Amino acid sequence: MKTDLSVDLGFLKLRNPVLAASGTFGYGTEFAPFLDLSALGGVVVKGLYYGPREGNPPPRIVETASGMINAIGLQGVGVEAFAADVLPELRKAGASVWVNVCGEDEDEYLRVIGFLDRLDGLAAYELNISCPNVKRNGLCPALRADWTFDLVRAAKARSRRPVVAKLSPNVTDIVEIARAAERAGADGVSLVNTFLAMAIDPETRRPRLANGFGGLSGPAIKPIALRMVYQAASAVKIPVIGMGGVMTGRDAVEFLIAGAKAVEVGTANFVDPASTVRVIGDIEAFCLERGIARVSDLVGTVRI
Amino acid sequence: MPLVVRAPLVRKQSWGDYHLFRFRAPEMAEAARPGQFVMIRPGETTAPLLRRPVSLHGRDGGDLEIFFQVTGEGTSLLARRRAGETLDLLGPLGRGFDLDVPLDGRTAYLVGGGRGVAPLFFLGLELAARGAQVKVLYGGRTAADLPVRDRFEEAGLEVVCSTDDGSFGRRGLVTALLESESSLRRPDILFVCGPDPMMKACAGISRRLGVPAQVSLESIMGCGFGACWGCVHRIARRGEAKWRKICEDGPVFPAEDIVWNGEG
């Protein structure tokens, strides 16, 4: 017997349900020494603004209990360098490439999409609605349903490719935001991004991150992420991609059972660069041992 | 090409907070260059979660050595590992020291502060093999902070020590030692690793002497291979200053490229 690992998101078929999460996988090429990029369900590359971005001063990361807080500040090379230097490498490697699309305002998101739309060899866009927005007092669109709706609708109107909205967990009601993205025409939602967090050095009484705050990720957030994925998947009809602290195949299976059609592996990539392929193998073994013919048979089967 | 390997810890020596591990990893040893580092998992669980960067200290056939100081939870856990146990390592990582420079017959001063001496043993042997006249300037707060000084001597490398409290070698900072040694004999090249203020001072001395210096920076790292962008330092090349990754573009940089805290 074999298990069919493929997943149909409706707008895109994946060879398996495991993607590498944006911000934890560089531009993908960093991982070529450790794994076959074409073996993954997808590679969501680091968030791209239109131009190169400076990022924040260090310290940018701090480790906390079973997790880490980062404030990288979305340092990056911009769309032109991505198209010239990175994308050809990823295509040669056979990766299914998603781009995490950033913007300081709606106009920049649309310019990034406009530029990427002219390139071949991209599977989808993950809309990073958690970027600080200069027209919204530095707040990110993900914080409000109406802002999320407006941005997703504008991106969908511009894009020739599927658009998945990546949701922030730093909201009162994740269901309201997920529904707004769905109403605006998102092809799917992915969640959760990192939790806004802080660490303080008691000796110096200063925040451990130069930026003060950062985003918490890793196994510490998994139970909260799982709850939010379950809530979102129960509320929308579009596919949900779950993430937050996935370290093992069993973690990934929990997200599938909660209702996610696919999962993203994030912080685990730093500890074990081959985490994504290990998780794929573990999911397959989980299914085989239990006689599950299709991994999609697990999706949304939580018994409540 | 970096590898993830599980390698047996074959020997462990400890001096207070300082530890020297020797592990067997022939493929990694073959690829390793002085100034490179490994990312090592302190334990087997998710607490602590991240690997810790540790400089390669030495190579002997298929064995590699690391020398580190306990500075927190991760290194404390690592220090409790015993000979015979297996280490989970990722490496070798980083560019290491640039040895594609004139070395034969040249005088090289290797300046190490505290645990920063770690990469200088591997480097010193390599430089000596390439015909350089190597002098190691090894500084610490007290005599207890100079645990591996004998290793350099036993390997035939000249070592001059300094301690802040005068408990061993010359009293004072290793930077003062560098000034006085340089006035006796001007070096052709400097290699530096230690705390930031010490490296910044050495960079200033190298500029005054008109001698090139290679400086190995330290940082908290999320991954060690360029994926997380967490370990940046301000680096200026051809007049353009930006945040560059210590793990991937370094950890060794030309002193003149490094923008120190409080500058620019």
Image (spheres, coloured by chain):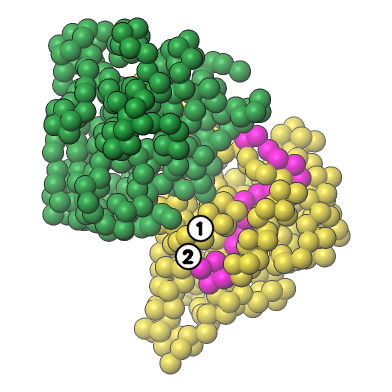
Chain colours: A yellow, B green
Q: Which residues are magenta?
A: A35-58
Kind of residue sitting beneath label 1:
Phe
Kind of residue sitting beneath label 2:
Leu
Label 2 sits on residue? A35
Q: Residues within 10 Å of mark 2 (few under 14, many from 20)?
A: some
Residue at 51%, 39% in the rendered image: B249
- Residue B246, percent from left and from top: 48, 36
Question: Position of A294 compared to A203: left or right?
Answer: right
Q: Quadrant of residue B239?
A: top right
- Residue A130, percent from left and from top: 66, 46
Question: Position of A124 compared to A218: left or right?
Answer: right
Question: Position of A138 compared to A260: left or right?
Answer: right
Label 1 sits on residue? A31
Q: Residues within 10 Å of mark 1 (few under 14, many from 20)?
A: some
User: Which residue reaches farthest bottom?
Assistant: A1
Q: Nearer the viewer, residue A65 or B202?
A: B202
Question: Position of A23 compared to A158: left or right?
Answer: left
